[in-house]
Amino acid sequence: AQVEIGNTINYGSFGTTADIDCADGKSLNVGGSNNTLTIKGAFAKVNIGGADNKISLDRVDAELSVVGLNNTVTYRDGEPKVNDT
């Protein structure tokens, strides 16, 4: 499920394949497991949590944080600070 609060998009699900279109300049939080997500738009910050997610992003400008196990995250553009814990 996707919920937008202020300038942040929150997405949480289990075992979902989805395309998500987001406006530029927002922040994104993703939680859950076994998701395959293609996310379009330019984000300031992205936080990924959970396990076994495969996430493809268009652009991350400031920060990319990944917490959890066995997550695969790719981005096509941007030079974010990457935190992988």
Image (tube, grey):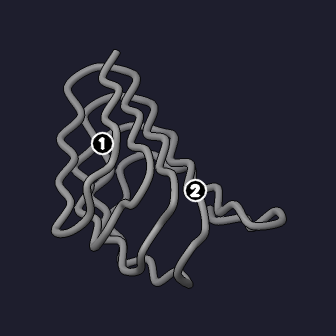
Give coordinates of residue 54: x percent, y percent: 22, 49
Q: Is residue 10 above or below residue 57?
A: above
The answer to whether residue 74 is left or right of residue 34 is left
The answer to whether residue 61 is left or right of residue 58 is right
Measured in 3D between alpha carbons, the distance from the residue under mark 1 to the one under mark 2, in whole angstroms, is: 13 Å
Residue 58 occupies quadrant:
bottom left
Q: Which residue is mark 2?
A: 11
Quick one: label 1 or label 2, which is nearer the N terminus? 2
Give coordinates of residue 1: x percent, y percent: 62, 62
Numbered disc in front, either 1 or 2: 2
Residue situated furthest top in the rendering: 85
Give coordinates of residue 21: x percent, y percent: 46, 84
The answer to whether residue 50 is left or right of residue 10 is left
* Label drawn at residue 23: none
Q: Quadrant of the C terminus?
A: top left
* Label drawn at residue 34: 1
Q: Which type of secondary structure does the marked residue at label 1 adopt? A: loop
Q: Is residue 44 above or below residue 18?
A: above
Q: Looking at the image, which residue is at 47% across and 50% down? A: 46
Q: Is residue 30 above or below residue 52?
A: below
Q: Which type of secondary structure does the marked residue at label 2 adopt? A: strand
Residue type for callout 2? Tyr
Q: Residues within 10 Å of mark 2 (few under 14, many from 20)?
A: some
